[in-house]
Image (cartoon, helix red, strand yellow):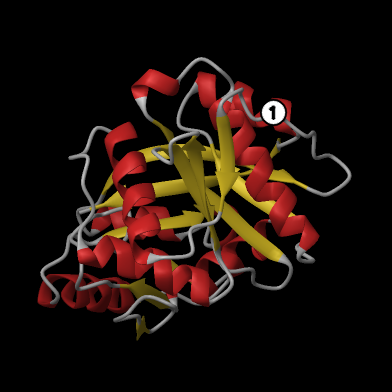
Amino acid sequence: MDERIQNSVVANLRTRPQATEVGPFIAGLDPGTDSQWVNYATPRPHATITAADVDALIETFLEAGRKPRLEYVTSTAPELENMLLAAGFTVEARHEYLICTPSRLTASPVPSGLSLAEPTTDPDRAALAAATGEAFGEAPQASEADVARLRRNQERGGIPLAALTENGHCAGGGQAMPPQDGTSEIGGIGVREPFRGRGLGQAITAGLAERLFARGVEIAWLEASGEDSWRVYERVGFRPAGKRLYISR
């Protein structure tokens, strides 16, 4: 499972506008944002990695004006962490990833007065990006680059999903990455403050997984940012399956 999840990360980063192969690494760079959650690298599973490869990766990020940063499933590059620490990197976080399969998925009702829909226009995508940005403490507005990323993800088979009020306002949402080898990552689940505590995040997560499985995906995976979100994902049917590392310089 670890190798399959890591391969999906590699494939996802290759879709970045300025994706760059640096020896055994894929650096997923996007000139439209300096967000560290978008601009990061990952190793190909079980590739041979040298100190010179790490130096080259650092230089690639610095030349692009981005912070050198990696996310990866630890078992697929067991020696890499020590090499990165020796090169001046610092561990940001260690997470367990969770997976769900069609047989495990538990449907979750959408709270009264709300509905789930995939955006079909750029204004719809802008509303989704603004709502999830606000949910994560960012400015409640979307840039053209934000909209372009959502559109590009959708055109490649990903699924953005918005929670809408009866008058069409976006209360929150999330998205799933384009499937690779029957696997897709769900992320960015965010709910605006006035709509929290009603099970909407759970409904969005279940809605994304349901749509993925309906399109032939075999495994949906995600990470929990804390105990509250962990409980939400477990209620939907996700179970821990492996460990990932976030590390930057």
In the image, 209 versus 222, the foreground residue is 209
Residue in view at x 18 percent, y 60 percent:
34
Relative placement, left or right, of 249 versus 161 is left
Left or right of residue 113: residue 238? right
Please identify the quarter of the rendering in which residue 66 is found. bottom left
Closest to the observer: 220 or 127?
A: 127
What residue is rendered at 65% in x and 72% in y? 180
- Asked if residue 7 lies left or right of residue 53, the reply is right
Mark 1, other Cα within 10 Å: few <14 / some 14–19 / many ≥20: some
Q: Residue furthest top?
A: 197
Looking at the image, which residue is at 50% across and 15% down? Answer: 197
Q: Is residue 231 visible?
A: yes
Helix, strand or loop at label 1? It is helix
Q: What residue appears at the point 44 percent right and 47 percent down from the top-left corner?
A: 245
Q: x, y percentage for residue 108?
A: 72, 30
Q: How far across and down, in percent of the image, does residue 211 sit?
A: 70, 55
User: Camera-side residue: 143 or 40?
Assistant: 143
Which quadrant of the rendered structure holds the C terminus? bottom left
* Image position, residue 96 (x, y; %): 57, 38
Q: Is residue 242 above or below residue 236?
A: below
Horizontal arrangement in the rendering, residue 136 relative to residue 172 (left or right): left
**Residue placed most toward the observer, 212 or 64:** 212
Quadrant in the picture for residue 213: bottom right
Residue furthest right in the image? 103
Q: Height in image: 4 above or below 241?
A: below
Above or below residue 200? Residue 187 is below
- Picture coordinates of residue 83 (x, y %)? 34, 60
Count of numbered labels shown in the rendering: 1
Can residue 40 be spotted in the picture? Answer: no
Disc 1 marks a residue whose amino acid type is Glu
From the image, tell me which residue sits under label 1. Answer: 234
**What is the quadrant of residue 92 in the picture?**
top left
